[in-house]
Image: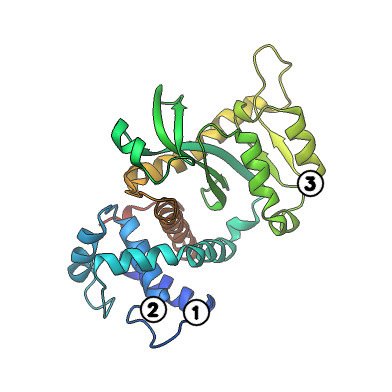
Amino acid sequence: MLTDLDTLITALYVEIDDHLPRTRRMGRPPKLSDAELVTLAVAQALLGITSESRWLRIAATRLPGAFPYLPGQPAYNRRLRAAEPLIRQAIRMLSQDTDLWHDDIWLVDSTPVECARSRETVKRSDLAGWAAYGYCASHSRFFWGLRLHLLCTPAGLPVSWALANPKADEREVLLGMLATEPELLAAHPGQTIIADKGYVSRDLDRQLADGGLRLLRPSYRNHTPRPGQHLLKSVRQLIESVNDTLKGQMALEQHGGRTPAGVTVRVSQRILALTAAIWHNRATGQPITRSLIAFDH
């Protein structure tokens, strides 16, 4: 079965409109429904368009008839920020609607999300106190912003995620992600999590084991090799490629967010777009589950 962006957004709109609760509002219903808003945001992310004003101009010609009403940029931005809880619900709903949700292996890693470069921008940013200076070992550079901590399946399906100060301990963030969703662990007993050396900790191993989880990660050179660690390198590269998809094809680091709510919803928007693409590819039997080629033009 062939697929394209129009097919995806049609299927996504129907799925969201049928299964997610509608937001209750006083007065007349909005001209752009919640399902249409979320679908519009997914299409923007898949096409890699970072400017909301430009996207609304393009949407009228790229997707003619798909959205009977398109708001102005201020209204779109305001509605999108308010819809962040709905976007999170949509991510989980689509994830659970694929067989990949039941994979018994999860991968975890973090990646920088730059939020500013100039010193003047850093000094006046509303993100100060949350964002901070951190170091990106992959590119050997410092950055000012946040870190995206992502838990996903080997196929790249997002399971859970969090944005945190770049100085926050990766191990503490992982425990926090799992602690805030006890139902996630209850639905996946005996899960195996694969991580890198940044998650080395006996205390972390113990706490995860207490929750019925098993952590696999490389040992330091001066430690006794852990069983099966020679197989981990190729598996850990999978989450690196997921981060590359978010950054390369969906312009994660060009998110344009200037406030905590703005950054959070733009990251959520891209994670939902990735989830929607995987969900649709899986449902239509595409050979490459995480391919976005059919949807980026």
Instruction: Examine the rendered structure and indicate whether residue 51 appears above or below residue 75.
Output: above
Say which residue label 2 marks. 33
Local SS, label 2: loop
Give the Cα distance between marks 1 and 2: 9 Å
> Which of disc 2 and disc 3 is earlier in sequence?
2
- Identity, as a three-letter code, of the amino acid under mark 1: Arg
Image quadrant for the C terminus?
bottom left
Sequence-first tag of 3 and 1 = 1
Asked if disc 3 and disc 1 are in contact, CB closer than 8 Å, the reply is no
Q: Nearer the viewer, residue 265 or 108?
A: 265
Tag in front: 3 or 2: 2
The answer to whether residue 182 shows anywhere in this view is yes
In screen coordinates, is 196 left or right of 183? left
* Residue identified by numbered label 1: 22
Q: Which of the 4 quarters of the picture holds residue 193?
A: top right
Kindly identify which residue carries mark 3.
211
Question: What crowding class fits label 1: few (fewer than 14 Cα within 10 Å), some (14-19), or many (20 or more)?
Answer: few
